[in-house]
Image (spheres, rainbow, N blue to C red):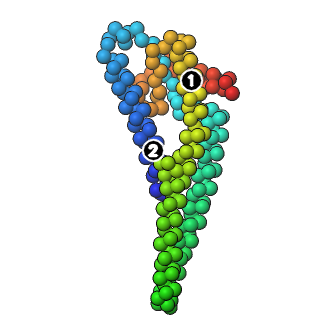
Amino acid sequence: MSNINLNQEVIVKLTNHLVLTLLVGMLVLFMGSNSAMAQSKIRYIDSQKVLDNYPAWQDVQKQLDELRQKYEGEFEQIRQEAENLYNELQNQSLLLSPEKKAEKESQLLNLQAQLERYQREKFGPQGEFYRKNAELTEPIITKINQIIKKIGEEDGLDYILDVAQGVVLFAKPEFDITDRVLEELNKAQ
């Protein structure tokens, strides 16, 4: 099961790294021009706060948690079956006929292959959990991005940064538009 969590952590870290790299690049380009800097309108949001306080996101996370628990339970059931067979094979090794021993070893190899296949099919990069996650979260992320863009256009903003990605080192609270994004998001439901 640690491989499952490790895969999810790697995906999150890679996504965060990509977003951070893009935002840092944007800031470097932006800082290249002092006159542009003086005239630019910049605001920021806390995307994690938006997600944490958006009921639709919470519902999706609950669905994904239930699905993950279901898959982990099924995985654990197969793993336990393989462990029991392994222990049985170890304990009865001397008592089993060569044919029976070979049969149990074959069953054990099949269970190990089944475990690997199950993990790949459910939690791999193209697995069911990954696809379901994308299916459920993409519409929400798209909606949030549309609202951020709408606010940016309405307010004539040049940049909206995300403090949750660790790019903003300092910002005055009056430039935080997180609550406004949440209000618009909740109105849109």
- 38 above or below 22? above
Residue nearest the viewer, comparing 126 with 21: 126
Q: Tell me what residue is drawn at x 49 percent, y 56 percent.
A: 120
Could you tell me which residue is drawn at 49 percent across and 76 percent down?
106
- Label 2 SS: helix
| Residue 49 visible within the image | no
Q: Position of residue 111 (x, y in %)?
A: 52, 69
Q: How many residues crowd mark 1 within 10 Å: few (<14), some (14–19), many (20+)?
A: few
Q: Is residue 33 above or below residue 119?
A: above
Q: Is residue 61 left or right of residue 123?
A: right
List the single residue furthest toward the left.
Answer: 32
| Picture coordinates of residue 116, whole percent (x, y) | 48, 62
Q: Amino acid at mark 1?
A: Gln
> What residue sits 56% from the left and 23% below the top?
146
Question: For residue 32, what is the image quadrant?
Answer: top left
Q: Residue under label 1, please give it.
A: 146
Horizontal arrangement in the rendering, residue 144 relative to residue 26 (left or right): right
Contact between labelled residues 1 and 2, with CB atoms less than 8 Å apart: no
* Distance Cα–Cα, label 2 vs label 1: 24 Å
Location of residue 170 (image quadrant): top left
Total numbered labels placed on residues in the image: 2
Q: Which residue lies under the disc numbered 2?
A: 11
Residue 18 visible? The answer is yes
Give the quarter of the image for residue 184: top right
Q: Position of residue 180 (x, y in %)?
A: 59, 21
Q: Residue at x 53, y 14 (%)?
A: 153
